[in-house]
Image (spheres, rainbow, N blue to C red):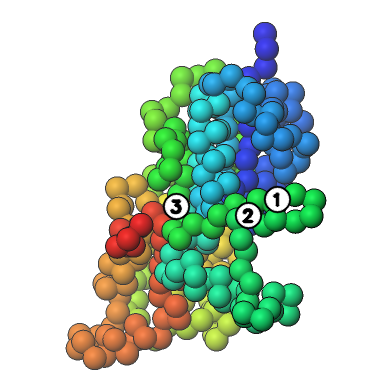
Amino acid sequence: MAKPKLALYWAASCGGCEIAVLDLHEKILDVANAFDIVFWPCAMDFKYDDVRKMEDQSIDLCLFNGSIRNSENEELAHLMRAKSKVVVAFGSCALEGGIPGLSNLTTKDATLQWVYKGSPSTISQNGGIYPQTHTKMPEGEIEIPEMWETVKALDQVVDVEYYIPGCPPQPTQIWNVIEYILSGKPLPPKGTVLGAGTKTCCDECGRERKEKKIKHFYRPFEIETDPAQCLLDQGILCMGPATRDGCGGLCPKANVPCRGCYGPPPNCVDQGTKMVSALSSVIDATEPAEIDKILDQIADPMGTFYRFSLAHSILRRVNK
């Protein structure tokens, strides 16, 4: 029997999801033995035309990581969707927009201005030169992708069967998913979040929580914390109450607050509002002015509450 065909693609992300696959260590050989890897441009020499020539629905499984940031990301999302039977949003960026999605707080022009204006390599008589989608050169015309105004999660562009959360997904969870697929068991219902739990990170955290009232928030470097006690109880903003379990509580184990990369727990529409709700029950104040004073101690609330989930949150642009 022919091996099932596997494709992996890296859109707008840091590349950590690709490394997570390699972190399977010797099990990567089992993956290579079990699947015919037909597209993995990060690791092997495949071209987009190779995929275009494939028959539709000929790829059994596509692990698509990264958000949709530009026209190339969109094109490949549609191409991989057409060629694949099962598409998995692999990692936080594909799942919810991830870190790139934070640029939705500003505009495309503002982003380009911040990155390029005044750079020594882009100064001209007319000021900063920004990337152009088409540039004529003596050797021919150069075409580069067009950057989008709004970053989107994968399922905001194409249909997706399953989701694997994490920044990046844990290798043990990746292997569990692959092993399940190889077992031949019936696939779970469409829309299932694979390699994660059904509770919150707090439920798998080994620290003791006493739900103390908070009068002051600290950044992790500002105080020496008790490794046995809940970080939130100690005034460290930890996203555990608003984050799905499944990672094993690795960040709190390392004395670092949960960042929220596994996304919101089940039946939660918006991770940020879930965290605000959790904080509302522990703030040690009753007067609005005092509450505001305590909350003002939180550095970068948007970047903290929506670090990975802004693009998929209820906060959307008026003009998309």
Q: Residue at x 49, y 70 (%)?
A: 109
Identify the residue under disc 2. 134
Q: Is residue 13 visible?
A: no
Query: Quadrant location of residue 309?
Result: bottom left
Name the residue type under label 1. Glu
Residue 236 rendering spot, x and y as whole percentages: 46, 76
Name the residue type under label 3. Lys
Q: Quadrant of the C terminus?
A: bottom left
The nearer-to-camera label among 1 and 3 is 1
Question: Residue 152 has which mark?
Answer: 3
Q: Residue at x 44, y 71 (%)?
A: 106
Q: Residue at x 47, y 45 (%)?
A: 154
Q: Residue at x 54, y 18 (%)?
A: 184
Tell me, yes or no, whether the two marked residues, 1 and 2, touch with CB atoms within 8 Å: yes
Element type where label 1 sits in the image: strand
Element type where label 2 sits in the image: strand
Q: Is residue 163 visible?
A: yes
Front position in the image: 128 or 192: 128
CA gap, disc 2 and disc 3: 24 Å
Tell me, yes or no, whether the two marked residues, 1 and 3, touch with CB atoms within 8 Å: no
